[in-house]
Each structure stands twice: as structure tokens, then as C-alpha cells.
Image (cartoon, rainbow, N blue to C red):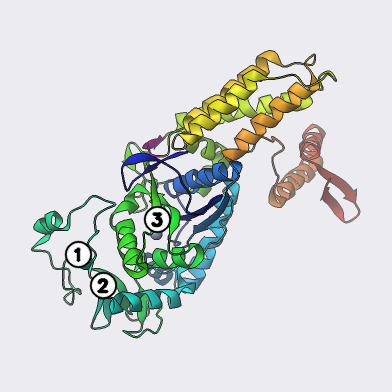
Amino acid sequence: MKIFNTLSRTKEDFVPIEPGKVRMYVCGPTVYNYIHIGNARPMIVFDTVRRYFEYKGYKVNYVSNFTDVDDKIIKKAIEENTTVDVITTRYINECKKDMQDMNVKEATTHPKATEEIDGMIEMIEQLIEKGYAYNADGTVYFRTRAFSDYGKLSKKNIDELQAGHREIQVTGEQGKEDYFDFVLWKPKKEGEPYWPSPWSDGRPGWHIECSVMAKKYLGDEIDIHAGGEDLIFPHHENEIAQSEAANGTTFAKYWMHNGFLNINHVKMSKSLGNFFTVREISEKYDLQVLRFFMLSAHYRSPLNFSQELMEASKNGLERICNAVTRLKDLKGTQEQKMEMPQVQALIDKFEAAMEDDFNTADAISAIFELVKYANIHLNADSPEADIAYTLQTIQTLCDVLGIITDQKTEILDQEIETLIEERQQARKDKNFARADEIRDILTQKGIILEDTKEGVKWKRA
Ligand code: AMP
Ligand code: ZN
């Protein structure tokens, strides 16, 4: 299996640290609002990477954090006149709901920064002891120049960067020895959440979170570290400096970065305001369509969001789901299983695409070819075993991509209640056709209605 490693800027063979196991860390969102579909890209892409490893028989330990202490969260709490805790609990729950609707598997562990402060203080103490960090009046900085490999991921050279920044002195950072030193711990400001530490009552810097959570849940050395390409510098560069300086060993073997999700060819971001939340998209499309759209491009390429591409994804997904439904309905003849070289060749094609740095776009075209094969060659006269094998193959490969092919869509309690109310109104209006139609819709979705003296009751079949 080949993975493009940002560290070497080449595709490398994947060799796990421990045979049969993958230790993977994916930087998660800062939780102060609903996630936007740009944030959804790494979630979907790296969930698919995980699923492919699992399909190949690896046991994956997948860790993805929630950043639940940050200036933006504090600002939001002040705006809403509430606590940071209320904001983060709300948006972690909303994020988990979006992830579930996008069929993103739960991480093995979803650590929260605020629950890992002790580990952060411990790592900062180690860094100070080893001469990689210093305390300047309650603020602790990482001594960037002390880490000789600094810049190896982003290919930045400190001296070149320095030339452009000689004049810049950020206010409040007078205690810094060098422009490139970055914050590991900062003292609290009035009204901010804080924790006691040997240096000041305060809170950790952002970068130290990930170094500590990766170490705690995955160990000093991990196989894959991933995130959006905007994280290469400074976040991931700083994580490498902290972890390798503290642990004395290579931090991550493979660094994977997804390209941006753009809108009108500009990066979608909260600060520019050019974003759609996953929740907004879910009002118009099943989030399976969003997932399919994200996987229709290679994860490292930029992807431009548009209505047309979403419609194309919707149609593509329907084509697959329709083929699955048709195969399920076909009974076929009870003959011996035949060899199916065409199907096997397409499984090989799918795997070859995924083995080549997770080329999901080509993997999807192998699935389309399978669908085409099924539509042309399989019918009621085909051997039952052939139908079953082809059906199972399509479903297995879709599952690797996290695409659900069952058209029996889940109906939510709220939707059921709304339809029942509409049906009651239709009856009052003597619109019996509509009332019957609603009963049929619910029956099709496995909901049984019972007219009782107390009103309409319902249950799932
Ligand atoms: P944030 O909450 O901004 O820290 O972002 C969480 C994750 O989403 C990080 O891995 C970012 O790199 C990623 N991300 C943010 N915006 C985009 C975008 N427009 N396209 C792709 N990935 C993004
Ligand atoms: Zn991170």
C-alpha cells in the first residue's frame, strides 16, 4: 500500500510500526459552532482510510481530538452570556450527530483537551528540563531553534523566514527569546477558564494538546498523523518539535494532508464567512450524498463545492442504490456458483486504486463498472449465487467507502410525528387520498399506525 507522505513529498510503502496494527491520529475540530463542510472533508477522508485498513485486516487505533479550550470558544461563550462548558458540550454533541449522519465511525478515542491538562503540564516540564522550553513571567515558550529538525515537514527554513520578520514584535510577547518561539502555556486573562500550573494559573497553547493526546492514547511513535493541509505549518511542524524533543524518538512515520474544500475556488472557512454547515446541507441532501461527493475527488486535490457536483453525486449514488435494490429483488435460478472473473477483476481494480494513496475517485469508478456489469448481465435467469456474490461485492466495496446502499432510509421520530399530524389534518379536511398516502409512506418505512381512543399511536415494525 502506498501513502503520499508530506514529510518526504513522495508516495511511500506503508510499513506499520507493529505488524497488523495502525496507530492513527487525526486533528479534530475546535468546537464553538456547527462544523462546516470543509471540516467534514478530513473526517470523511480519513474515516475512509481507516475503513480500508480495516478491510485489509488491520486493527486500527483511531484517535481524534476535540479542541475545547480556545479564544474563539471563550468569545462565543461571552457573546451568549454562558459558560465555555455549555458551548463545547453543545457543539461536541452536534458534531457527533453530523459525523454519525455522514457515516463517520466513532474514533477509538475522542479525547478533549480540557481533560488532558495534567499530561500537558508534564510534557511542558520535560521540555523545560531538557532545555527546549523556558518560562518568561508565567508564559512558557518552546525554544524553536533548539530543535534542529525544525521545518522538516513544512520545508521552511527558520533563517529565511527570520529575514522577513525582523521588525515584528507581537505585543504581549516581550518575554520571547526569538520570533519563532511559540506558546506552550499562557497565563489566564480575567474571566477565562484556567488551570493551576508551576508557571501560572492559565491554559495550554493549541499545539501541545495534540502532542500529548497522541502520546497518551497511541504511544510515543505513531504510524499516521493526519489533518487538513492548512495544519502543516505551524501546527504539525510544532507538534513534531514538541513530541520529538520530549520523547526523543520519531513522532509520526506518515503525515497525510487533505486538500481544501473550496467554494468559488476559495478555501471555505469560518473567518471568510463563505461556508455551509453540514447541518445546512443535510436539509437539502442525505449526507450520504455529501460523503459520495467528497470521495469523488482524490483527497489531496482541491475540491470545489457546487450544486451541479452535488446533483451529479446524488445521481451517481442513486444509480448504485438502484442496482443494489434490483439485485436484492432478483431471485435468480438455483444453480451452482460460477466463476465470476469480471467481478474479481473489478475488485482488483478497486483495491489497486485504494492501494495507490487512497484514490477513491478511481475506486468509485470500479464500483460503477460493477453496477454496469450487474445491470447488463444479471437478470432473473442468472444463477442465484452469481446475483448474491455480485450484490455482496458491491455492498462490501461501498462499505469500505462508508457509503450506505440500503435504500430503506431511517425515519426519525420527529418526522413520524409530523407526518401523523399532517395525516390527522388531511382526515379533518376530508382529504382521504392524502391521509392514505401518508399511511402508505409510513408503512413503507416500517412504521405501523394504530388508531386508538387516545389518538394515533405508532410503532416500528
Ligand atoms: P479547525 O476547526 O479549523 O481547526 O479545522 C478542523 C479540521 O478541518 C482541520 O483538519 C482543518 O485542516 C480542516 N479544514 C478546515 N477548513 C477546511 C477546508 N476548507 N477544506 C478542507 N479541510 C479543512
Ligand atoms: Zn492537532
Q: CA distance from mark 2 to mark 3?
A: 20 Å
Question: From what the image shows, is residue 415 above or below residue 248?
Answer: above
Residue 252, which numbered label?
A: 3
Label 2: how many Cα within 10 Å (few below 14, some 14–19, many 20+): many
Q: At numbered mark 2, what does the secondary structure look like: helix, strand or loop?
A: loop
Q: Which residue occupies the foreground of this view, 426 or 201? A: 201
Question: From what the image shows, is residue 70 above or below residue 374?
Answer: below
| Residue 230 placement (x, y as % from top left) | 32, 50
Task: Indicate left or right for 40 with 166 as reference.
Answer: right
Q: Which residue occupies the foreground of this view, 276 or 172? A: 172
> Badge 2 is on which residue?
132
Q: Residue at x 80, y 13 (%)?
A: 381
Q: Residue at x 46, y 46 (%)?
A: 15
Label 3: how many Cα within 10 Å (few below 14, some 14–19, many 20+): many
Q: Along the polypeptide, which appears first: circle 2 or circle 3?
A: 2
Residue 180, which numbered label?
A: 1
Q: In which image quadrant can residue 80 be found?
A: bottom left
Q: At numbered mark 1, what does the secondary structure look like: helix, strand or loop?
A: loop
Label 1: how many Cα within 10 Å (few below 14, some 14–19, many 20+): some
Q: Is residue 32 visible?
A: yes
Magenta residues (range):
300-305
Question: From what the image shows, is residue 299 above or below residue 84?
Answer: above
**Mark 3: amino acid:** Ala
Q: Which quadrant of the figure contains the C terminus?
A: top right
Note whether ligand 2 is within 8 Å of mark 1: no
